[in-house]
Amino acid sequence: MRCLALNASYEPLTLVPVRRALRLVIDGKAEIVEAEGDHVVRSERLTFPRPAIIRLVRFVHVPRRFRRQVTNTFLFARDDYRCQYCHRSPHELRSRECLTRDHLVPLSRGGRNEWTNVVTSCSTCNTRKGNRLAEECGMHPATPPHEPHFVHLSWAVRRLTPIQSKYIRMFYGEDALRALKAL
Ligand SMILES: [Zn+2]
């Protein structure tokens, strides 16, 4: 289980290992907002309730570059694990095929590695598209790529406990939570 870390503003930031969360609490950098059941964690001298939610004591500005970083794990989650050209999911791919990252404007033509320029593509579609633009080859992604919220992505690939869900709901509302659970 991981601990949900909130900014001082209560904005959910990310999930961290429980040990790391406790270290922040012991160092006075965070406070425990909610504990998980009756579980306790022991350090050398101290006993703590196992944190489900911590809140940073001081507000942290999360640099945009961290929020924007594209990883295949998050990219594939954003695109619902489907090739944006032929709409197949991994279990529909043949044995030599895999999901890859396709750049709408190819890197070789000045395209950048950012959320609005990348989509999930199976290796076959990616090869067929080559370094052409959508309008040159008639291959358009099913959904126009967008920059997802950093934290949404973290949640999409991990599991939240009910207590953690409550804080997501408080900050982003029921719709966001439902959208996440549908992933
Ligand atoms: Zn495909």
Image (spheres, helix red, strand yellow):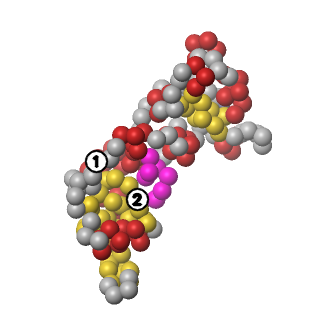
Amino acid type of the residue tagged 1 in the rendering:
His
Q: Which residue is at a point 48% across and 46% down the rendered structure image?
A: 183
> On the image, numbered disc 1 is attached to which residue?
61
Task: Identify which residue, 45 or 80, lies in the foreground.
Answer: 45
Count neighbours of disc 1 (C-alpha within 10 A) and say few if under 14, some if 14 to 19, many if 20 or more.
few
Label 2, residues with CA under 10 Å away: few <14, some 14-19, many ≥20: many
Question: In the image, is residue 157 part of the stretch drawn in magenta?
Answer: yes
Q: Earlier in the sequence, mark 1 or mark 2?
A: 2
Hey, which quadrant is residue 84 in on the image?
A: top right
**Part of the protein shown in magenta:** 153-161
Residue at 30% over, 74% down: 26
Distance Cα–Cα, label 1 vs label 2: 17 Å
Ligand 1 under 8 Å from disc 1 Cβ = no
**104 relative to 122 in the view: left or right:** left
Tell me the quarter of the picture where residue 90 sits. top right
Quarter of the picture containing the N terminus is: bottom left
Amino acid type at mark 2: Leu
> Quick one: SS at disc 2?
strand
Vertical order, 175 against 3 (above or below): above
Q: Which mark is residue 15?
A: 2
Residue 25 appears in the figure: yes
Ligand 1 contact, mark 2 (Cβ < 8 Å): no
